[in-house]
Image: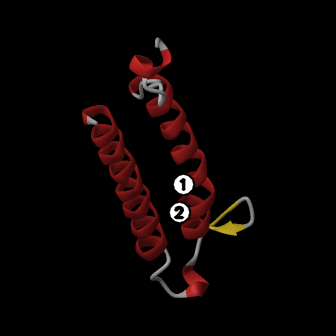
Amino acid sequence: MKIGNREALVGVGLFLFNFVWWFAFAYGLGSKDPSEYSYVFGLPSWFFYSCVLGVIVMSILVIIIVKGFFKDIPFEDEEFENK
């Protein structure tokens, strides 16, 4: 149960990081007048950094967290299987 709680907290932490990342770029860069926007690959920079780059960064973080910190836990009760 301890491992599950820790992994749930890590998941909530990843969610909060994703939300802060998105919010900071979307409202930080996107709050200017549209005529003042800068563009990356034809997209407004606020959209590129918050949505496109955000998905790439979060995908890499999730892969690293799952492979490095999460444990494989069997859901079957071994005590009953041995009988």
- Disc 1 crowd rating (10 Å Cα; few below 14, some 14-19, many 20+) is some
Q: CA distance from mark 2 to mark 1?
A: 5 Å
Q: Mark 1: which amino acid?
A: Gly
Location of mark 2 (residue): 50
Splitting the image into 4 quarters, where does residue 80 fall? top left
Q: Nearer the viewer, residue 71 or 46?
A: 71
Q: State the residue at coordinates (50%, 77%).
A: 30
Against 42, residue 34 (above or below) is below
Find the residue positioned furthest to the left.
2
Residue 77 place in picture, x, y as percent? 43, 25
Q: State the residue at coordinates (39%, 26%).
A: 69
- The circle drawn on residue 25 is none
Q: State the residue at coordinates (30%, 32%).
A: 3
Q: Mark 2: which amino acid?
A: Ser
Find the residue positioned furthest to the top.
82
Location of mark 1 (residue): 54
Give the total number of marks visible in the rendering. Answer: 2
Q: Are marks 2 and 1 in contact (CB under 8 Å)?
A: yes
- Disc 2 crowd rating (10 Å Cα; few below 14, some 14-19, many 20+) is many
Residue 10 as seen in the image, left or right of residue 56? left
Q: Which part of the image, by quadrant, shows the N terminus?
A: top left
Residue 45 place in picture, x, y as percent? 58, 66
Residue 11 place in picture, x, y as percent? 39, 47
Find the residue positioned furthest to the front.
83
